[in-house]
Structures are given as C-alpha cells and as structure tokens.
Image: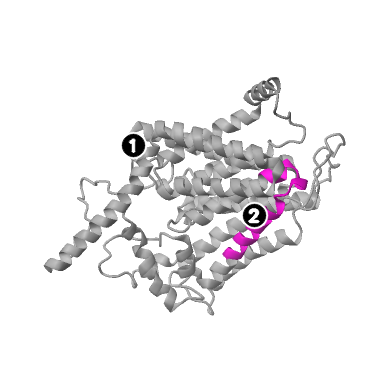
C-alpha cells in the first residue's frame, strides 16, 4: 500500500509525507524483527520454500546504501561540511527510508510467490497512477494541490509536480510489469508451435489467463507514458526495451521467443497503434521543437551580438502563463554552471540536498531561470555528496546490474529470468533518464528504484529450477 500512496502527495516530495513514509518503513522493519525474535516458527511450505537472499552480494549492496547514508550524516558533523544543514538532515532521513525499504525486501521477500506479489503490487501502483493521470488529463481542469498550481490537458502529470516525474515512475512500474509478464512465460511445459490447433489453443489460453490482465495493465501504463509527452521518458523506455530484448536473445534461448513477442507487441501495438491514437506524434513534435528552438535561440543570439544588442531572454507574462518548449540550452544551462561547483569541491560536495543553497553563488548572471535542482541526477549527486557519494551509489547500481546478468541463465528457471529481465530494464531506464532529469530526487521514484534493486538481491542464485514432476 505504501507504493500506491507514495506518489499521491506530489510524489511524497514534501517534508511531512516523506517523514510519514520513513516512519512507516521503520515501524514495519521493527515489527518484522520482533516477529522473528518472539514469534513462533511456522513449518516451511514445501510448495514455496523460504529462501534467503544471495548471501554476501545482498549484504554488500545493503552496506553500500548504508555507507551512503552515513556519508550524508558525516557532512553534518564538525568534521564534515554542508551549506544547508536542514536540507542535509532531510536527505539523511530520506536515505534512512531507502535503507529500511531495501532491508525490508531482503527480509520478507523470500519466495517466488512473495516476489511476484511485490512486483505485481508495483505494477498495480503504476496502473492506479496511470488511470489518475489519464482522467485528470482528459478533464482539462485547473486546480491547486499542496500549493502547486496545475493546468491539465497539456501534458499528463497525475499527482506528481511534473510530467517527467510521472514518466519516470511509470518506467519503473512498467519494468515490474515486464518482470511479472516474462516470469509467466517460457515455461518448459508450454505447447510447441507448429500446428494450427495448438496455436489456437495457446491463443485462447492466453486470452483467459492472468497474462492478458497483465498485458492490459501494461497498455494502460504505456498510454499514460505517451500522454506525459516526456521526450527522455519515452526515449528511455524504447531504448531500454530494445537493449533488454537483445540481451535476453543473447543470454536465454528459452526466454528468447516470449521476450521477442512481448517487445514486438509493446512497440507495434502500444507505441504505434495506441500511441498514434493518444498522440505519440506530439512526443515526436516536442523533440523536433526542441531542436528548432535551439536553432532559433542561437540565431537570435548571433544576430543580437552582431547588432550590439543584448541577447533576448525568455519572459512570461505574470497573469497569463504561456507554455513554451524548453530548449536544449535551457536544460543543460544549470549543468554547465554546476561544473564550477564540482571543480571547487569534487570529492566531498557542498552537502547532501544543498544544491539550491550553493548554486546561487555559481549561477551566471545571464541565467534568468529558477533552478532548485541540476536537471541531472549525476551532476546533483556529485555537487551534493561529491565523487565519494557518486561512487557509492554507482557501485550499488553496477553491482545490481551485474547481478541481473548473472541471473539471466536458463538453469535459473522462468521466474528468475523474468525478474532479472524486468529489473534490468528498470536499471537501464534509471541510468538513461538520470542523465538530463532530476527524477531520482523525487521520493516516490527513488523508492520504486530501491525496491527493484532489492528484488534483484532477494533472488537466490545458483539453484536450478525445480522439476515439474517433483515437488519443490
């Protein structure tokens, strides 16, 4: 339920929902510990044996997250440095929530059934958010939520502050859905193609199974993803889907055909047929408008320099705000200015969450826009926690990515392969979307990524799938 609730109050990107989320996670963790200490041990279920995580790898991944939290807390000490102690305390609190959630998944998700239930819950949370976004987008309404003004009908935002944050949340939910879908495919006892009767039987069986429900849920989320008009979000989904499909084709012969069918259906049915119906062409137009706006801005600046006038700056009327595409120069302007911050304190940064406080000194005078984030998770992590913080989080991501590669083997069974493929897709989406966006600064999105990483380490490795003729 926390995954469904997290995006509702503007992605839990305010202090009170963030504190409530952290408290809920650690209360659940404390209850789990008390039940393990004083609760009665139940006999193991032979159909779904309880298994622990992947040993030292899971402990190392959790330790990296704990070390990052400790590094953020060290910046508050007399030996550390931060320009915004209050914001750094909030970042420490956020990180404690992610540590608790990671640990909770490792403790509770100890069987294939629980893992599928958790991934299905993430997918349901994405569908709920997608349906809210579609309804609000269709209403063309104007309203205020937690002191934020919204104008629906331009780009779907759901209950997030911006459409790009919603797109990133949907990417993680789609990755969980792909994991659920692929884990149900590639069963060794599936009917072999070749006869029309068997193919018809397989098609009817698919229409009546839970796979069809999962497929419909994926369609709903893709519709909402297209309605966000997020250029990087839709592009990351397409690239991640292609990379993961090629990876599966090369690594898993048994999962090769189901993955190719799923990828083809997502591209052809969702992105082309449904995408054209809900306005995929407008996403392409936004990409083209970005390039045209960049050229127009360069031409205006060149003509202004030639005539001796000052370059024009983008202005908005205070009473009638007009939507205008953000150019590529506007997107990378804070990244360019933040390079001076990195040069001054490359290893330790200016304090976790202190980008807004420190950036005001390094922002050039020609920058007239308001930036509370760097519009790149990589750059903001370095400016806040230095290369030390980036190394810790980067090691966690790379270690988890290597774990997904290790699990993509046919001897692991369809469930493990499906989980590895879906979580690998989520990792690729996170790495791509973090280049020119700030979505991991949103609590709901960072929590979804944390759960995906923990699910990877909840899978026991080195075990062959159980025989269908022998009880597990």
Q: Residue 60: x percent and y percent?
A: 69, 63
Q: Which mark is residue 356?
A: none
Compared across the picture, whether 34 is left or right of 126 comes to: right
Q: Residue 8: x percent and y percent?
A: 48, 43
Q: Give the residue at the far top of this rendering.
A: 197
Check the picture and name the quadrant holding the N terminus.
top right
Residue 124: quadrant of the picture:
top right
From where the camera sits, is residue 47 visible?
Answer: yes
Which of the marked residues, 1 or 2, is nearer the chain's N terminus? 2
Q: Tag 1, which secondary structure?
A: loop
Q: Tag 2, which secondary structure?
A: helix
| Residue segment shown in magenta | 393-418
Query: What type of secondary structure mainly makes up the magenta span?
Result: helix
State if disc 2 and disc 1 touch (CB < 8 Å).
Answer: no
Residue of label 2 = 102
Q: In the depicted view, which residue is nearer to us: 255 or 165?
A: 255
Badge 1 density bin: few <14, some 14–19, many ≥20, Cα 10 Å: some
Of marks 1 and 2, the one in the foreground:
1
Would you place residue 88 above or below residue 239 in this image?
below
Would you place residue 97 above or below residue 169 in this image?
below
Residue of label 1 = 153
* Distance Cα–Cα, label 1 vs label 2: 37 Å
The residue under the point 21% across, 59% down is 299
Q: Residue 139: x percent and y percent?
A: 35, 31
């Amino acid at each position: 339920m926390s995954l469904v609730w997290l995006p509702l109050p503007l992605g839990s990107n305010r202090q009170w929902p963030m504190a409530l989320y952290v408290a809920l996670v650690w209360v659940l963790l404390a209850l789990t510990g008390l039940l393990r200490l004083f609760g009665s041990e139940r006999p193991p279920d032979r159909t779904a044996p309880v298994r622990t995580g992947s040993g030292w790898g899971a402990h190392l991944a959790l330790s990296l997250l704990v070390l990052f939290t400790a590094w953020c807390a060290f910046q508050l000490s007399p030996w550390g440095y931060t320009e915004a102690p209050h914001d750094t305390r909030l970042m420490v609190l956020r990180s404690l929530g992610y540590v608790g959630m990671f640990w909770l998944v490792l403790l509770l998700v100890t069987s294939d059934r629980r893992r599928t239930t958790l991934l299905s819950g993430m997918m349901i949370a994405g569908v709920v958010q997608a349906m809210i976004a579609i309804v609000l987008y269709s209403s063309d309404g104007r309203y205020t939520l937690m002191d934020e003004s919204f104008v629906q009908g331009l780009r779907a935002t759901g209950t997030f502050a911006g459409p790009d944050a919603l797109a990133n949340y949907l990417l993680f939910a789609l990755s969980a859905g792909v994991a659920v879908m692929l884990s149900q495919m590639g069963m060794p006892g599936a009917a072999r193609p070749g006869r029309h009767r068997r193919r018809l039987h397989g098609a009817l069986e698919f229409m009546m199974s839970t796979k069809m429900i999962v497929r419909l849920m994926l369609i709903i989320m893709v519709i909402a993803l297209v309605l966000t008009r997020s250029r990087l979000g839709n592009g990351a989904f397409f690239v991640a889907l292609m990379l993961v499909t090629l990876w599966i084709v090369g690594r898993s012969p048994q999962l090769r055909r189901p993955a190719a069918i799923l990828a083809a259906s997502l591209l052809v049915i969702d992105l082309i047929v449904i995408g054209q119906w809900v306005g995929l062409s407008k996403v392409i137009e936004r990409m083209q408008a970005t390039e045209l706006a960049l050229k127009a801005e360069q031409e205006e600046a060149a003509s202004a320099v030639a005539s001796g006038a000052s370059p024009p700056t983008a202005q908005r009327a205070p009473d009638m705000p007009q939507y205008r595409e953000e150019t590529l120069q506007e997107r990378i302007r804070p990244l360019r200015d933040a390079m001076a911050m990195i040069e001054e304190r490359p290893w330790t940064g200016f304090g976790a969450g202190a980008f807004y406080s420190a950036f005001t000194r390094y922002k050039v005078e020609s920058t007239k826009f308001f930036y509370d984030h760097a519009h790149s998770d990589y750059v903001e992590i370095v400016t806040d926690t230095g290369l030390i913080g980036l190394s810790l989080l980067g090691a966690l991501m790379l270690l988890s990515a290597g774990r997904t590669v290790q699990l993509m083997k046919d001897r692991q069974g369809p469930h493990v392969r499906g989980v590895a493929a879906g979580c690998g897709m989520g990792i690729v989406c996170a790495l791509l979307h973090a280049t020119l966006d700030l979505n991991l600064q949103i609590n709901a999105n960072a929590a979804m990524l944390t759960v995906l990483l923990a699910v990877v380490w909840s899978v026991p490795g080195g075990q062959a799938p159980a025989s269908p003729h022998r009880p597990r």
